Image (cartoon, rainbow, N blue to C red):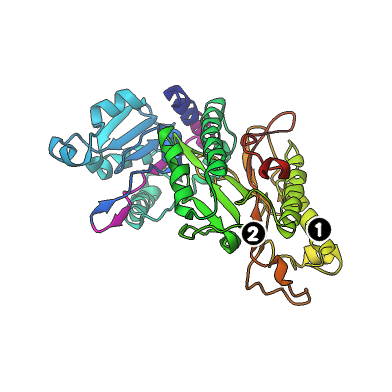
Amino acid sequence: MTNYSEYQQRREQLMAKIGNGTAIFRSAPMAVMHNDVEYAYRQDSDFFYLTGFNEPEAVAVIAPHHEEHKFILFVRPKDPEKETWSGYRTGVEAAKELYGADETFPINELNEKLPGYLKKADKIYYRLGRDRHFNDTILRHWQNLIRVYPKTGTGPIAIQDVGTVLHPMRLLKSTAELEQMRKAADIAVDAHNYAMKFAKAGQFEYQIQAEIEYIFSRNGATPAYPSIVASGANSCILHYIENNRQMQENDLLLIDAGAAYNYYNSDITRTFPISGKFTPEQKIIYELVLRAQQAAIAEVKPGNPYKQFHDTAVRVLVEGLIDLKLLKGNIDEIIEKEKYKHLYMHRTGHWLGLDVHDVGVYQWGENPQNLQPGQVLTVEPGIYIGPNIKPVEGQPEVDERWRGIGVRIEDDVLVTAEGNEVLTAGVPKLVEELED
């Protein structure tokens, strides 16, 4: 678990960036599974990043300009009757002591107390979210202060999305964060390695899922996202989660499963032959995807534009698909006009951290986001030749022998000062490692 001094350092860093502004963060709501049954609670990532507080119905206020209170928490008060049904609450007094707040209040006092932390701010930093009622609350307070601005000459004259300030901070992982991410990666590596040994023809996809998620749970982790266990032609469905097919001889099995540990996520995909041997066509497609991934990972290093590893993967894939006569034409034109997208339809990666698709800008207008040490991203090229695939205009029909082959290979890669570190390298991916 991250030391609470780290949360304080993050708040201080944010305070330095917002100056005389006030930042407001709302906790995540409880999500309902059905009727009156709720999902296990998962805190909003921005809220957790700054506080470590893991309860709903809470608001965090960061007010660096305030004389006494720089960090304020509004939380649920203790309630023995409700706690009997729904679990213990930290409460107002303990929240101040445990989470380092300068002041804490019951959540029902928010409307009364919040104006005191806004009236001397020059700007409100708040991300308009899906909680429309709370959005309206913030806007109402702001409008009230704007109304008296001509008389006082003080108060916030604008609202800025706090993500524009906070998310560049989240993009660069600290030593403590990387410790959690390595643990999440190690747990997922163990699960994938076991799944490769366990899987065999005749089993159902959900049996593999159960083994993977058992290993997550046994190690104090949860699934980072719905696990994808896709055999046969199901491997051509990018977000396949039914996991209910019985696996057959000569199937490929694509497993995309990551672990969440102390809120930090891993994200791994491997594709391997159920019967221990690739068919000739499967092997050709697999080796092409692997070459693309290896070339892309080599481009993950400080100073390179974020998009460079994607562009590298695309070029390797397109060159290979032309050689296989699955694409035809000029390589540059195919890439420019995206005539490969019926075979490879997604980007080659995304930021990774507190969210699986983590926050952070990929490009600043025409200017690239250059990679920096401390960033973590996925590298995950693929080829998906669905059984009913329709080529884009001007591209060849796909021969039957290729249909139903889907391959994706994904690793989590840390940008280091020297280049990169593959956090998930412990799962084999070379052909000779995957075949019996």
Tell me if mark 1 has few (under 14), some (14-19) or many (20+) residues whose alpha carbon lies within 10 angstroms of its own.
Answer: many
Q: Which residue is mark 1?
A: 320
Vertical placement of 234 versus 312: above or below? below
Quadrant in the picture for residue 250: bottom right
**Magenta stretch containing residue 28, yes or no?**
yes
Labels 2 and 1: the sequence-earlier one: 1
Q: Which residue is mark 2?
A: 406
Q: Secondary structure at mark 2?
A: strand
- The percent coordinates of residue 417 (x first, y second) are 72, 29
**Magenta stretch containing residue 194, yes or no?**
no
Quarter of the picture holding the N terminus:
top left
Q: Is residue 274 left or right of residue 320?
A: left
Vertical placement of 378 versus 419: above or below? below
Q: Which residues are magenta?
A: 13-35
Amino acid type, mark 1: Gly
At 73% from the left edge and 57% from the top edge, which residue is drawn? 285
In the picture as drawn, the residue positioned furthest to the bottom comes out as 393
- The percent coordinates of residue 381 (x first, y second) are 68, 52
Q: How many marks?
A: 2
